[in-house]
Structure formats: C-alpha cells, structure tokens
Amino acid sequence: MAQLKSDGLFDLQVNGYGGIDFNDASLTAEKMDIALQAMLDDGVTGCLPTLITASKKDLLERIVSLDIAVRESRLGRVMVPGYHLEGPFLNSEDGYIGCHPKGGTCDPDAAFILSLEKDIKLPILLVTLAPELSGALETIKKLHHWGKVIAIGHSSAGHDDVRAAAEAGMTLSTHLGNGLPQQLPKFDNTLLAQLAQQRLTACFIADGHHIPKADLKAMLSIKGIDNSILVTDAVSPAACAPGLYKFARMNIEKSDQGKVTIAGDNMLAGSALCLNEAVRNVIEWKLVTTEQAFKMASKNPRAALSHALEYHNITLDPGNVIWDDNFDPQDVQYRNAEFPSIT
C-alpha cells in the first residue's frame, strides 16, 4: 500500500477519552492534555468536547471547569475551538433519552445557552436538542442567529417537526440511529424523517455496537457520503483497557468486545470508539472507499461547523496525518507555524 496521507480527523462528539471524563467538574488542564494527547495519537487534530444532560447548576459548573481545563492545557488551544452541548433540551421518554438523566431535561431555552457562555471564553458551537419540545423552533432560530450549529438527537420528531426544524436552521443529526426506542411507528418516525430530510447531515457511530453494519450501509446509501459524518460519542474508557469507569457521575463498564454500558446493565452509555477505528471499520466492512471514509471523519465534520466557525471568526488548522496500512497514524503535523508544537 502506498503511503496514505489525509487531513487530521475531527470529532464532533466526544465526552471523554484516555480515562478522562469531560463531564467531571474536577477536570484539570493536566487531565485534559492526557485525553487530547491520546486523541492526537489516534490522528485526531481537532474536536468538540461534549457535555451531556445535567441540572442547570451542574452544567454551569462542568462547562466552566471544562473551559478552564481546555484553555490552560498545552493542546487545548490547538485542538479545541469550542464545545458541544448534548442536552438538556432532550426528549425524556424511555428509549429516546438513553443514558441521559431524565431529571436534568427541560424545554429548549436559548437564553440558557447564553447564560452558560457568560462565564467561559470559548463558545458553544454545537447544540443537540429535540425539536418536538415546546419552544424548540424559536430556540433553533435564535441559536442559529447567534452562530450555533443545531443538531437533532434523543428526539421523537416525525416528518413535520423535522421539516420545521430544518427550515428554522437545524442542519445535523446527532448519532443517527441511536437514542431511539427498539420499536417505532411504521412510517412517521424520527429515523425515517431524518434520513429523508436533505438539509440534515447525519453523524454515525461506526463501532459495530450502535448500528449493525447492514443498517449503516443502508443509511449511508440514503444520506450519501457528502452528508455523512463519522463521530465516536466516546466516553472515558476510549483508548483504554476494559473495566469500570466514571462518566458524568455514572458507573460505566467497557467490555472485552469494546462495548460501553451502564455498569450492571445493557444500556449503551457512549462508546469506546477511536475515530481512526471508525475509519478502519467502514473501510474493512466495505461500506465506503478509503477516500470517502477519511472525508467523513475530517473534511465533512469541519464543513458542518462552517456557520459557527465563520460567526466566531475561528480558523481551524486540520493538519496532516500519515497513516500506516492499519490506519494508525505514523506522523501528525499542523500546517500553520503559528500553532504550538505538539511534540
């Protein structure tokens, strides 16, 4: 195989990595560097650290700690342009809510997002919410106007609600195919509605646990490569050995097969997927070409953030990664000499 070179990968949804939980209010710059270095070692040159649903008090505490840790870390100012807030504006019904704490959910409120940003320096660039909730459409319009990218997730929205959300400014689907009950209405269900909505780009967790290979193949075929993104939804045990870990005050367990669940339960609680593994998987499963796989993990996620990046005058340096035959990085370099050294 000839030497393979690509842009650095970019993860839109990562809750933790390398044994570090981004939803821990005691997060430090030193811990942040451990996580970011582990991601960099896997060819990821940029990411949006992601916070899940919690009480408003806890979310404020967590995002302030996260922001300080990122800004004081060695790699944070290179790799992290802002944050992803997945909740608390989610559907709290069983099946849709997943492992998010039901008690932390609430109806969408754009002013709350501004209140979270008041005490941090880096912006919230991506917000995941359920558009069927009261006040959602007005919130989508305001957040879009304020330079946020809006995604649908943990939602029961059917065709009408999804169409209205897209018209209001929603452009992404968070981990499409997940955050859903085992049984859905035959036709007017949120999975079909999101697949059919051409204005939504879909994010997929290609770990073999969240979406069966055949179903992922079908969804990629419907959406098309240009409108598909690989994400990890990684939590603390990503790039770590099987065992017990903490995630947002929950006890979680990584199995020998790499599946992450609530400890003692079979409910998925994020993943232990590394983004270069996602690239390797979709290639080995013969779902896409090598070029397409890297596009879904590098160019497409950056393009999905273009609205927010332009609004906040943020320039991303994707860097260059040289890969071996197993899609493990052999060399990672940033292009802009102004970016700090990563060695």
Image (spheres, helix red, strand yellow):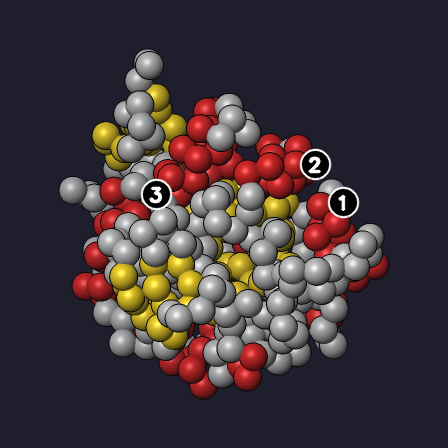
Q: Which residue lies furthest to the top in this view?
A: 2
Residue highlighted by disc 2: 222
Q: Is 167 or 102 nearer to us in this picture?
A: 102
Tell me the kind of residue under disc 1. Ala
- Dot 1 surroundings within 10 Å: few (below 14), some, or many (20 or more)? some
Question: Residue 287 or 194: which is nearer the viewer?
Answer: 287
Q: In the image, what residue occupies the spot 48% across and 44% down? A: 208
What secondary structure is marked by label 1? helix
Q: Vertical placement of 296 versus 257: above or below? A: above
Relative image position of residue 96 (x, y in whole percent) = 63, 67
Which residue type does callout 2 highlight? Ile
Q: Name the residue under label 1.
A: 196
**Side (left or right) of 182 relative to 112:** right
Which tag is nearer the camera, tag 3 or tag 1?
1
Tell me which residue sits at (26%, 53%) in the image: 240
- Density class for disc 3 (Cα within 10 Å; few <14, some 14-19, many ≥20) is many
Disc 2 and disc 3: Cα gap in Å? 27 Å
Q: Which residue is drawn at 38% across and 80% down?
A: 61
Disc 1 or 2, which lies upstream in sequence? 1
Q: Is mark 2 on a helix, strand or loop?
A: helix
Hey, which residue is sitting farthest left in the picture?
A: 343
Residue 304 percent coordinates (x, y): 56, 46
Disc 1 vs disc 2: Cβ atoms closer than 8 Å?
Answer: yes
The numbered dot on residue 239 is none
Instruction: Tell me, for residue 44, which label it has, or none.
Output: 3
Q: Cα distance, mark 1 to mark 2?
A: 8 Å
Residue at disc 3, secondary structure:
strand
Three-letter amino acid code at the position of disc 3? Val
Of the two numbered discs 2 and 3 on the same chain, state the one appearing first in sequence. 3
